[in-house]
Amino acid sequence: MPVPAFRDLLAGHLDGEALDRMVSYAELLERWSAHHNLVRVANRRELVERHLLDALAGAELLGATGRLLDVGSGAGLPGVPLLIVRPGWRGVLLEPRQKRWAFLKRTIRELGLDAEALAVRYQELGGDRVFDLVTMRAVGGLGDLVEWARDRLAAGGGVALWTTEDGEREMANQRGWRVLSSPLVGLERGRLVYLQAERPCFT
């Protein structure tokens, strides 16, 4: 059975420059994962559906321009796919593991993304930068991460979590946040949870 081309698998979802960049990203992921275990996939279709299209579920949360912080970016998911389809956004990808950080640096360079990769944990992120969206996929300690993100959000900004039903329930009880969630297509228990900080009301 012939191996499907990434372009054919993605063509129904993207076009133009976004399609070209996503194909290049998929090829990089496949090549590096063969040696560095970036993502575990059985075949190209699984790579596209489970990782790339899964990441793009958050694209509707992004306007035309903004600042994205991807915490624990790993292989660049969901940050890289989101920056590919929203070229008006600037991204910061946090990944303390050296091999994955090296992969992110190369990906940013080869795809021409407006982004930087930093080899630090989120607690070590210095400066006073704020972001319109903070993303986290398949990371632990969600409550601590979300509370840390609160002070990093611009007005009207939010946090997007690619998580499970358990993570969704945990976030539903997070005080001081407005929480929205939706199923992730193709993942039985996957959930995309979006949180916006509730602002004090003065009367």
Image: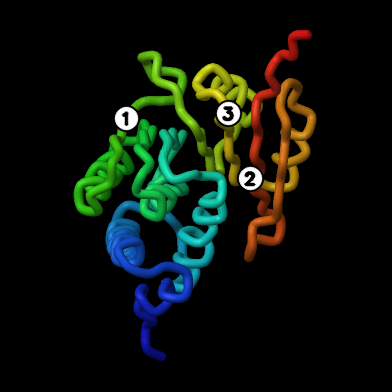
Give the farthest residue toward the top: 203
Q: Is residue 25 left or right of residue 39?
A: left
Frontmost of labels 3 and 2 is 3
Q: Is residue 122 above or below residue 160?
A: above
Q: Nearer the viewer, residue 32 or 51?
A: 51
Frontmost of labels 3 and 1 is 3
Give me the residue at 51% from left, 51% from top.
Answer: 59
Q: Quadrant of the C terminus?
A: top right
Instruction: Estimate how packed mark 3 is, as few (under 14), some (14 to 19) or many (20 or more) residues with alpha carbons within 10 Å.
Output: few
Report the residue marked by disc 2. 163
Q: CA distance from mark 3 to mark 1?
A: 28 Å
Q: Quadrant of residue 72?
A: top left
- The circle drawn on residue 156 is 3
> Residue 108 placed where, x, y %?
26, 46
Q: CA distance from mark 3 to mark 2?
A: 22 Å
SS for callout 1: loop
Report the residue marked by disc 1. 119
Q: Quadrant of the N terminus?
A: bottom left
